[in-house]
Amino acid sequence: MLSDLKRILDQISRDKGIDRQLLIDAIEEAVMSAAKKKFGQRRELEARYNDEIGEIELFQFRNVVDVVEDEQTEISLTEALLLDPEVQLGDELGSKMDSVSDLGRIAAQSAKQVIIQKMKDAECNVIYEMYKERKGEVVNGIVQRFERGNIIVNLGRTDAILPTKEQMPRKSYRQGDRIRALLLDVRQSSRDPQLILSRTNDEFVTKLFAMEVPEIAEGIVKILGVSREPGARAKIAVSSSAADVDPVGACVGMKGSRVQNVVQELQGEKIDIVPWSPDPARYVSNALSPAQVSLVVVDEEKKTLVVVVPDDQLSLAIGRQGQNVRLAAALLGWRIDVKNEQKYAKISEEGFQSLLDVQGMDERTAEALYDAGFNSAHDLAQAEVATVVAELGSLDEHRIVRLISAAQKVNVDQGQDDAEPGSSEAGDKPL
């Protein structure tokens, strides 16, 4: 096992980039562990690597005594004098033991396992030190193999893992394909994968644009927000610190060359580049592009935005399966409610608002009641259950009864509020 040790140490140190002394320390420790198992745990032993002969030498240290009571820790004066003519009683005598190769099969196997583990730990530390400062960078590699849906990528000095959840949907690779990804995490562990890659992380888009757009690399243009549905569509918000630099134009490039390079790397993922703004109303108007926005109602406290668009722009603003407004909401970090002008005019009316004040009422039910002619809580409070059931057959009769009862309570409360001192009467006006 330990033959040609010097050559092996040199080769591993060169190929793996592991400090040679770390390997020597690991082998000495492994031999010590094996020797303790064979010769006894109480024996004081020391393993040393002899670089001249390329071997591990094992020494034991024993106290010189007249009568040996414990042969693991003691040696008789007579025997000690044969090893060192100048030794005296009470001295500690070190002597070289038989060849390490005589440790036995089990001990040698144990030493081998320790050496392998120590080498893994040393290699782990080398990889960690090499890549810890590169976390968040884009790296290039070659697809090596596949393990349970994960892709193992060779980066040159070591392998990294691209987990299934970090892979672009509907994209397959073959062994030997070149691949580019974000170095998402660097772990200091020899048991789990050390280098974790991602192609779905928002930061991957940011880094790709930084590689394509010199103004971003120089810090003139900044990407202040990214939202993605990997493989489908992304939105990025950009801002410029120089008045004469258009941030959107810089990212798009001449004839769209810069953004197209990023789109190509992302396998056709559509990218909307929008101007960032500190004003939420202006920002959301930009984020919902290409839809036109008529009005934005901002609720700073609840972080919600009601966006009003022309009737013919509603589907464009919402997008296919809600994708456009969903990405815009993720970009701003606000809740966005998009309504067309006709619907907003309806819900802005006082009567409609009074319907929303009815306990148990939701906007969809209020809209259905309003369209059926029950234009306020007052109208609903005076309605017959049978009439409402006839108009809104989709509503459960028991729920209608509860809503009418709640509307009557709202109506009574409103009447009480109106009957204040100084008023001539408490009228039953619509809310």
Image (cartoon, rainbow, N blue to C red):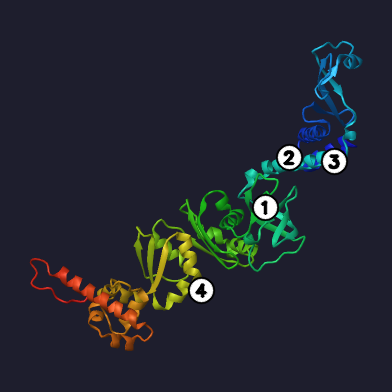
Q: Determine which residue is flagged by label 4.
A: 321
Q: Determine which residue is flagged by label 1.
A: 139
Q: Where is residue 289 in the image (x, y as percent from the top left)?
A: 47, 68
Which residue shows up at 49% across the image and 71% down it? 322
Q: In this view, does 153 lie above or below 319?
A: above
Q: Is residue 57 above or below residue 164?
A: above
Q: Distance between the residues labelled 2 and 3?
A: 24 Å
State yes or no: discs 1 and 2 in contact (Cβ < 8 Å). no
Q: Name the N-terminal-most of marks 1 and 4.
A: 1
User: Which image quarter: residue 270?
Assistant: bottom right
Mark identifier at residue 122 = 2
Between label 2 and label 3, give the one nearer the viewer: 3
Q: Distance between the residues labelled 3 and 1?
A: 44 Å
Mark identifier at residue 106 = 3
Q: Where is residue 237 in the image (x, y as percent from the top left)?
A: 49, 59
Q: Distance between the residues labelled 1 and 4?
A: 34 Å
Q: Name the N-terminal-most of marks 2 and 3.
A: 3
Q: Is residue 289 visible?
A: no
**Quadrant, the N terminus:** top right
The kind of residue on which mark 1 rests is Val
Image check: 299 left or right of 428?
Answer: right
Judge the density around disc 2: few (<14), some (14-19), many (≥20) Cα neighbours within 10 Å.
Answer: many
As helix, strand or loop, the secondary structure at mark 2 comes to helix
The kind of residue on which mark 4 rests is Gln
Between label 3 and label 4, give the one nearer the viewer: 3
Which residue is the extreme one toward the right? 82
Q: Name the N-terminal-most of marks 2 and 4.
A: 2
